[in-house]
Image (tube, coloured by chain):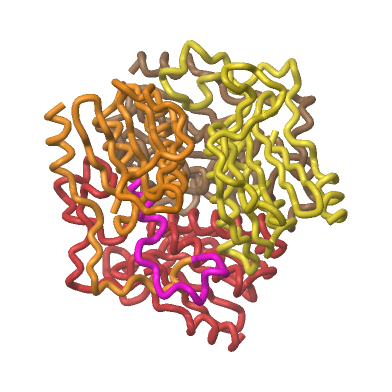
Chain colours: A red, B brown, C yellow, D orange
Amino acid sequence: MAEVVAQADRRSEGIVINDDWPGYSLDLFSYPAHYSGDLDSVIIPHGVIMDRTERLARNIMDDLGDHDIVVLCVLKGGYQFCADLVERIKALSRNSNRTIPMRVHFIRLRSYLNDQSTKDLHILGAEDLSFLAGKNVLIVEVSQPCFCCFLSVLQNGLIVYTLS
Amino acid sequence: MAEVVAQADRRSEGIVINDDWPGYSLDLFSYPAHYSGDLDSVIIPHGVIMDRTERLARNIMDDLGDHDIVVLCVLKGGYQFCADLVERIKALSRNSNRTIPMRVHFIRLRSYLNDQSTKDLHILGAEDLSFLAGKNVLIVEVSQPCFCCFLSVLQNGLIVYTLS
Amino acid sequence: MAEVVAQADRRSEGIVINDDWPGYSLDLFSYPAHYSGDLDSVIIPHGVIMDRTERLARNIMDDLGDHDIVVLCVLKGGYQFCADLVERIKALSRNSNRTIPMRVHFIRLRSYLNDQSTKDLHILGAEDLSFLAGKNVLIVEVSQPCFCCFLSVLQNGLIVYTLS
Amino acid sequence: MAEVVAQADRRSEGIVINDDWPGYSLDLFSYPAHYSGDLDSVIIPHGVIMDRTERLARNIMDDLGDHDIVVLCVLKGGYQFCADLVERIKALSRNSNRTIPMRVHFIRLRSYLNDQSTKDLHILGAEDLSFLAGKNVLIVEVSQPCFCCFLSVLQNGLIVYTLS
């Protein structure tokens, strides 16, 4: 598995956005009318995320092809990205001789308990997660300020994929 | 709101598949290699679901445009369909003068309790759902044998959209 | 190359539409408003053509991967299908270790000359096509009543792919 | 029509790429294997062009909705962009109450004649273009160094849309 980690290490660290980048002008793209007034510019166009998702799917396919994986989607933020990523992996799977059987599970995290902020993350509405033991688990999460990221916990190692 | 219900009633009941329809030959479409051996034919190609989803998004936009809605996605089955549908509604929203502000929430249902089957549905991992009171709620669910369906609970009425 | 022809022969003959199939109800799909009144039903939804195009791209990749090809797009009918097909082949090409370098050329055909119908097809606006000699040429054409079809003329053989 | 021109004038001039922008790292995106070695970086990701195409389609719909147009696609460079743009306009057309009936025609240009470079552009393989008289014509062209651009010749005016 060390080899796999090394392989991921050689990859780019994601999209770097300079602090002085003013973003794209709003009238270059379509956006919902009820956002106008609240938006100044577009930092990462939707299509760039789609292109990055396509490449991440390929990286995952290259690293994990022919292994079963469990996709753990962290709600609520991660669900659209997870759906796009899973669709891309499926597209690769159905058009090649390699395949990644996937099951998707959902969890919610929160960092407070009984209205008290804690330093620990609590898994909300969790059923027993013991079925993950010994599995290849792909955790899909969207967090700030790193726009979109997810990581793959392998049985014997860890690969971090970062979208941007 | 009665008018809205009537409008929905005039619409088609979804895709009707005759019992004697043998389906499309498998080699007409791409599908994951690990399904081969388990599949006989394709009954509803993926693209038909995409086309239907586009039309449902338009119907929802026509019925609910300029209203806030809460999308209640029923996991696990509904999440991919929900993601596709929400994306389509957003596409309509950002390319027209009408808009549907949406928030998406997730619930899980099960029909058994403490390993005992019951006739009632239980909402799993539910936080308090009282925030739905007085809202326009779009419940997105995939159930068998009706391949994909969802229904919209309006404040003063009910519209049922059926994909197939 | 005989092997390739045999491989293509084993494939399905495309989508068969029975004469008594009434088609899908119009209100199941979105279509341009200016078509209403002229349409009775939908025989082949757009998404089915997209799904078939994805599979044809895969078949072409399987048959011709790592060969250069010249795509000969027959205008005007074939251009949208050609664009979709080339995009699909490129998607496979950029996500696998195999590749199909492609150049796209355009021709127009007509079956009449100086307002006189003839039994021969004439190539309109043709530059010299001698550059095709010895090349693998993929002719992309849409003809009636076979909704969409195209054929691949290989150096030493012929493969016919039919969409529907 | 002066109003339309003014409206277009208020829009952004397209995507501006600074001379010192090094581009995106190649391993952020998928690209055909046979390009590796020839590419240093990605300047405009494919998804950005798709997003811009969606917005251009909307601008065209806003300016020309409910008018018939003739789309004049300049081969060879413009055909993929033209296919994407026309598909986007159709998507808007079939999901709104407005519509743009379109016919697509194809021309080729060259700036040399009998192997002699000239300062004039010659239309290759041209049938009689007199049918364009009095029509709203949307010319779709891809030219360098302006990556993708096209312009719309109206009966009584001119709108220039620039993708980047």
C41 or D131: nearer the viewer: D131
Relative to C109, residue A48 above or below = below
Query: What residue is drawn where x is 21% and y is 46%?
Result: A35
B133 sits to left or right of A78: left
Query: What residue is drawn where x is 25% and y is 29%?
Result: D154
B95 or B109: nearer the viewer: B95
C102 or B63: nearer the viewer: C102
Relative to D107, residue A126 above or below = below
D132 or C82: nearer the viewer: D132
Image position, residue A2 (x, y; %): 59, 88
Residue A46 makes an appearance in the image:
no
Query: What residue is drawn where x is 66% and y is 55%?
Result: A94
Q: How many marks?
A: 0
Q: Is residue B92 magenta?
A: no
Q: Is residue D39 magenta?
A: yes
Image position, residue D45 (x, y; %): 39, 61
Image position, residue B52 (x, y; %): 52, 32
Q: Which residues are magenta?
A: D30-53
Residue C133 makes an appearance in the image:
yes
Quarter of the image for residue D67 reads: top left
Relative to A67, residue D134 above or below = above
Query: What residue is drawn where x is 59% and y is 37%?
Result: C74
A70 sits to left or right of B55: right
Quarter of the image for residue C4 reads: bottom right
Image position, residue A141 (x, y; %): 42, 65
Location of the C terminus of chain C by quadrant is top right
Location of the N terminus of chain C by quadrant is bottom right
Spot the residue most to the top.
Answer: C37
Quarter of the image for residue B163 reads: top right
